Image (cartoon, rainbow, N blue to C red):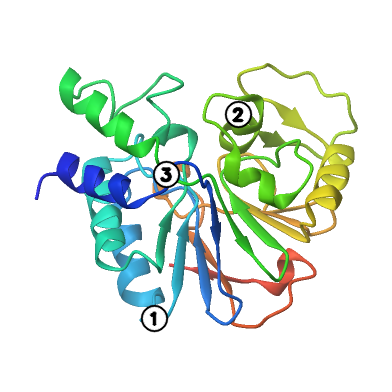
Amino acid sequence: MALLEIARDVARALDPKNRLVRLDRGTRTVFIGDIHGDLDAVERVMADIRRPEDALVFLGDVVDRGPASRECLERILSAKLEDPSSIHLLMGNHEAWGVARFRPADFWQPLPAGEAEGLASALLCLPFAAWHPSGVLALHGALPDLGAIDDIATVTAGTAAWRDIAWGDWSSEQEPIQTSASRPVYGPETFAARSARLGVRVLVRSHQPDAPTYLFENRCLTLFTSCAYGGPRRVAVLPPKKRADSALDLELREI
């Protein structure tokens, strides 16, 4: 089955009016950071990390930068078709070609126009975040400025809340921080206020290769699972029924 057909099948099974995945407290959950075309990383996760009963949450940015973007996307989406309740691919900024173009885009730019348009449309159906009832929120970038965790379900691609989720960065500097509308940067005050409002104990995210692994008194974990940035390839594992009071309660595993 061709990649475009697989992507469309996945999109048809998703609900674009519900952008929030709800995870099961009783299931071991594995969070996977940016992949960026690293097929070896995907295969290691599937073969060495994943157990049949696990939930896998990919934090976005599957394509671009690495040599096997198409193969990575096809592998993850095919797994989603086979096991839709356990495999979750969240939208990163590199899956959002249909709403916000960027450069460089090693995967998207060489595609024939028809295939690029079809894939971009299908991937715009992806969820934006995954919520674990232990208080762990997984998304690609930063916390959105919303009133409650349920509000994430109705966020629309292209809005300010979506841009925070897909493009937002974090800094340990005190605010205000000089930033741009296209890639907002927030500091500890914003993290404290938004996490309290949303009821988030721990944020698991990726997107920002220069960020420390742990920020904000170990409540924000930045995770990468790609060789694209030269650092260790890691996943984070949350055991079943585990209460997470800090990101240190998740087990980091190198692959």
Residue drawn at (53%, 79%) of the image: 27
Q: Residue furthest left?
A: 1
Residue type, label 2: Arg
Q: In terms of sequence position, does the residue under pointer 1 or pointer 2 come before the other?
A: 1
Q: Position of residue 60 (x, y in %)?
A: 46, 45
Q: Is residue 145 above or below residue 137?
A: above
Observer-nearest of 133 and 187: 133
Residue type of the residue flagged with mark 1: Arg
Q: Which residue is the site of mark 2?
A: 163
How far separated are the C-alphas under marks 2 and 3? Answer: 15 Å
Q: Is residue 209 visible?
A: no
SS at mark 3 in the image: loop
Disc on res. 59: none
- The mark lying in front, picked from 1 and 3, is 3
Q: Which mark is residue 126?
A: 3
Dot 3, crowdedness within 10 Å: few (<14), some or many (≥20)?
A: many
Say what secondary structure mark 2 lies in: helix
The x and y percentages for residue 37 are 32, 44
